[in-house]
Amino acid sequence: MSAASAYCQLIAVAVALPLCLAGCGEEQGELSQWIEQQKREVKPNVQPLSKPKKFNPQAYASLVGVEPFSNQKLTVALKQEARQPNSLLAVEINRRKEPLEAYPLDSMSMVGSVVKGGRTYALLRVDNLLYQVKLGDYLGQNYGKIAKISETDVSLREIVQDAAGEWIERTSALQLQEKAR
């Protein structure tokens, strides 16, 4: 290829490029006109927002009574419940609390089980500490008492309030947590 023919091709491209761009410009012009027409025809219908209502703060006037969310009020209510003869809670309130009752069940994980002297123990991890529990021990914050220990889980009976405020028993379980490798 000679320099003259390359020069001719360059001139041809330089002349053809503005012509191609001019063709695109007409199309853009029609599009711009259509957009402007649509903007003029459409009338937005927006409802104005209502003004906010004025908030008048009220002072709490019952400072002499017991605070509605105090621990004192809850303790009194639990003791009254425990005085009832058929209450599930009566025995639970009057006994000494065990260390694992300070932790919720979802913060505990079963990591194994051991048999010593014919008695089965479960190994529970709580706050990176390992605890050994047996049948009859208490754990969790809902008066949970261990009812059964197997190689794969710990079953326990808890005492909780239902929607009507009655104390009922329910069963829960901690499953063996195997570490992923």
Image: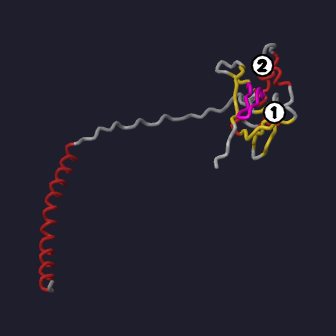
Q: Residue 110: x and y, percent?
A: 73, 38
Q: Residue 132: x and y, percent?
A: 81, 38
Q: Residue 152: x and y, percent?
A: 71, 34
Q: Residue 17: x and y, percent?
A: 15, 70
Q: Nearer the viewer, residue 40 or 48?
A: 40
Question: Can you tell which quarter of the image residue 124 is in?
Answer: top right
Mark 2 secondary-structure assignment:
loop
**As drawn, 163 above or below 5:** above
Mark 1 secondary-structure assignment:
strand
Q: CA distance from mark 2 to mark 1?
A: 27 Å
Residue extent of the magenta highlight: 145-158
Q: Nearer the viewer, residue 57 or 96?
A: 96
Horizontal placement of 49 versus 121: left or right? Answer: left
Q: Nearer the viewer, residue 63 or 142?
A: 142
User: Which residue is located at x 14 percent, y 65 percent?
Assistant: 22
Question: Counting other residues with Cα less than 10 Å from the Cα at mark 1, is it few (<14), some (14-19), or many (20 or more)?
Answer: some
Question: Can you tell which quarter of the image residue 73 is in?
Answer: top right
The answer to whether one can see residue 159 in this image is: yes
Q: Which residue bears the numbered disc 1?
A: 120
The answer to whether one can see residue 143 in this image is: no
Q: Name the residue type under label 1.
A: Thr
Q: Name the residue type under label 2.
A: Leu
Horizontal placement of 45 versus 13: left or right? Answer: right
User: Which residue is located at x 78 percent, y 45 percent?
Assistant: 129
Q: Which residue bears the numbered disc 2?
A: 88
Horizontal placement of 174 versus 37: left or right? Answer: right
